Amino acid sequence: MTIEKGANWGEVVASCDGGILATGDLSRELGVDDRRAIHDGPWLRLPLDMITVETVDSRGRHHERVVTSWLTAGSQMRGDFLIVSSTSFVGGRRIFSRAHPNDGRLDWLALQPGMSLRQRMAFRRRTRTETHLPHPLVSVGTGASLTRSFVRPVTVRFESGESMTNVVELTATIRPDAAFTHIPAS
């Protein structure tokens, strides 16, 4: 069950068996050290949402992947660019200030192909301080799923460093409470 505003999140357990190791942007989101210090317990077991990503490549082949926190499609500097996330941090930057890894929704931001390089650079600078301003070629949203088609094939990159090339269609769907992680209980 997704976390409710003001409610406690997770449960205290004696050991941290199974689950996803909180690293990278997920550890930053949870406020824990990437290097998981030696900790005997107790642990806080936290439910996490997962993102199911279905893609179609330029040859019509279907692919599916499940990711923990985020993915990008396209190039930040030109053409279509899309970020889909279940966390506020994407690539070390806090892009979605209201996102949470167990809120049961996706957050996305899309830059349209007509946006100039100069405008993209200015937009990127403003995201450093979470002050990105509205722009007619930028769209943002939230929801349980997102489907996007691309005129030209794009590369989809995942938080893990993996990528898929020649993607012409992408569908991302949130899976609430699909996994869990452990962090030291204080």
Image (cartoon, rainbow, N blue to C red):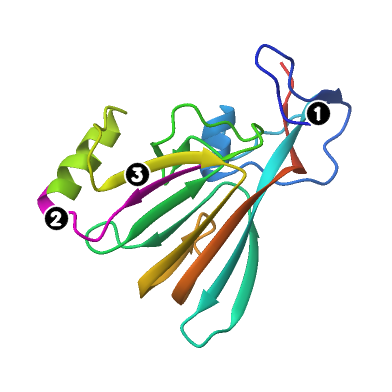
Disc 2 crowd rating (10 Å Cα; few below 14, some 14-19, many 20+) is: few
Which residue sits at x=18%, y=54%? Answer: 115
Q: Secondary structure at mark 2?
A: helix
Cα–Cα span, label 3 and label 1: 45 Å
Q: Amino acid at mark 3?
A: Ser
Tag 3 residue: 139
Of labels 1 and 2, the one closer to you? 2
Which residue sits at x=19%, y=49%? Answer: 120
The image quadrant where one finds the N terminus is: top right
Q: Position of residue 127 (x, y in %)?
A: 29, 35
- When the figure is inspected, residue 98 is found, relative to residue 146, above or below; the finding is above
Disc with the residue nearer the chain's start (1 vs 2) = 1
Tag 1 residue: 40
Can residue 51 be seen in the rendering of this structure? yes
- The answer to whether residue 163 is magenta is no
Tag 2 residue: 117
- When the figure is inspected, residue 180 is found, relative to residue 149, above or below; the finding is above
Q: Amino acid at mark 2?
A: Leu
Question: Which range is magenta?
Answer: 107-118
Are discs 3 and 1 less than 8 Å apart at CB? no
Are discs 3 and 2 less than 8 Å apart at CB? no
Can residue 32 be seen in the rendering of this structure? no
Disc with the residue nearer the chain's start (3 vs 1) = 1
Q: Amino acid at mark 1?
A: Asp
Q: Secondary structure at mark 1?
A: loop
